[in-house]
Image (cartoon, grey):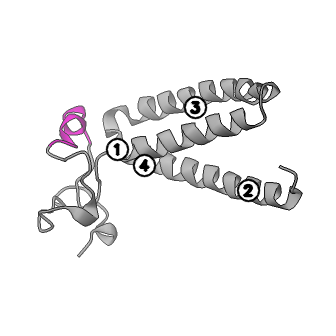
């Protein structure tokens, strides 16, 4: 980009997005992984993340062919990751999994594009178990 202010602004916005994505992803994975295997699951996710950082320099190296290629690759990976988050089960008003059996049955019965705001059975709640009552919708 020939405009340094625009480039710096987009870099700041991009860095902010990365920080928000990492922080919310770390919280979300700690919620979804059953208690019995939470440590192993979180460490496996971190190992995949560290392996991905190995390829970051190779992605940046693609700039020798065109300056737009690294931006397109990283943008495509970001959009793909955001779209894959939509496939995760909804946790609002649900008891979080504690055992492996709970984790296997956690998202059963949900449609692929079902979200808390468009759920047909809005009265259905599953908050009998361990949950933060401050986060339960009324």
Name the residue carrying label 2. Answer: 10
Q: Label 2, label 1: how many angstroms apart (C-alpha)?
A: 32 Å
Q: Quadrant of residue 132?
A: bottom left
Q: Label 4, label 1: how many angstroms apart (C-alpha)?
A: 6 Å
What is the span of residues highlighted in magenta in the rendered image?
98-108
User: Residue 135 or 71: which is nearer the viewer?
Assistant: 71
Viewer-nearest of discs 1 and 3: 3
In screen coordinates, is 80 left or right of 55?
A: left
Viewer-nearest of discs 2 and 4: 2
- In the rendered image, residue 79, in percent from the top left (x then y), is placed at 51, 44
Q: Secondary structure at mark 2?
A: helix
In screen coordinates, is 29 left or right of 104?
A: right
- Residue at image point 49% right, 32% down: 45
Of the image marks 2 and 1, the number of the one nearer the N terminus: 2
Tell me whether circle 4 and circle 1 mark residues in contact (CB < 8 Å). Answer: yes
Count the numbered circles shown.
4
Tell me whether circle 4 and circle 3 mark residues in contact (CB < 8 Å). Answer: no
- Residue at image point 22% right, 43% down: 107
In screen coordinates, is 49 left or right of 91?
A: right
Of the image marks 2 and 4, the number of the one nearer the N terminus: 2
- In the rendered image, residue 13, in percent from the top left (x then y), is placed at 69, 58
Name the residue carrying label 4. Answer: 28
The vertical placement of 81 against 5, above or below, is above
In the image, residue 106 lies in the stretch drawn in magenta? yes
Q: Label 2, label 4: how many angstroms apart (C-alpha)?
A: 26 Å
- In the rendered image, residue 117, in percent from the top left (x then y), is placed at 27, 66
Of the image marks 1 and 3, the number of the one nearer the N terminus: 1
Name the residue carrying label 1. Answer: 32
Instruction: Look at the image and tell me in which quarter the C terminus lies.
Output: bottom left
Q: Secondary structure at mark 3?
A: helix
């Amino acid at each position: 980009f020939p405009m340094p202010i625009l480039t710096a602004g987009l870099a700041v916005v991009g860095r902010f997005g990365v920080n928000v994505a990492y922080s919310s992803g770390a919280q979300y994975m700690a919620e979804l992984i059953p208690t019995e295997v939470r440590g192993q699951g979180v460490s496996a996710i971190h190992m995949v993340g560290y392996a991905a950082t190995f390829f970051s320099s190779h992605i940046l190296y693609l700039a020798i062919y065109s300056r737009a290629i690294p931006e397109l690759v990283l943008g495509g990976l970001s959009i793909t990751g955001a779209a894959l988050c939509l496939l995760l089960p909804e946790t609002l008003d649900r008891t979080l999994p504690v055992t492996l059996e709970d984790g296997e049955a956690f998202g059963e019965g949900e449609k692929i594009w079902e979200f808390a705001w468009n759920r047909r059975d809005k009265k259905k709640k599953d908050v009998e178990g361990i949950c933060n009552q401050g986060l339960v919708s009324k």
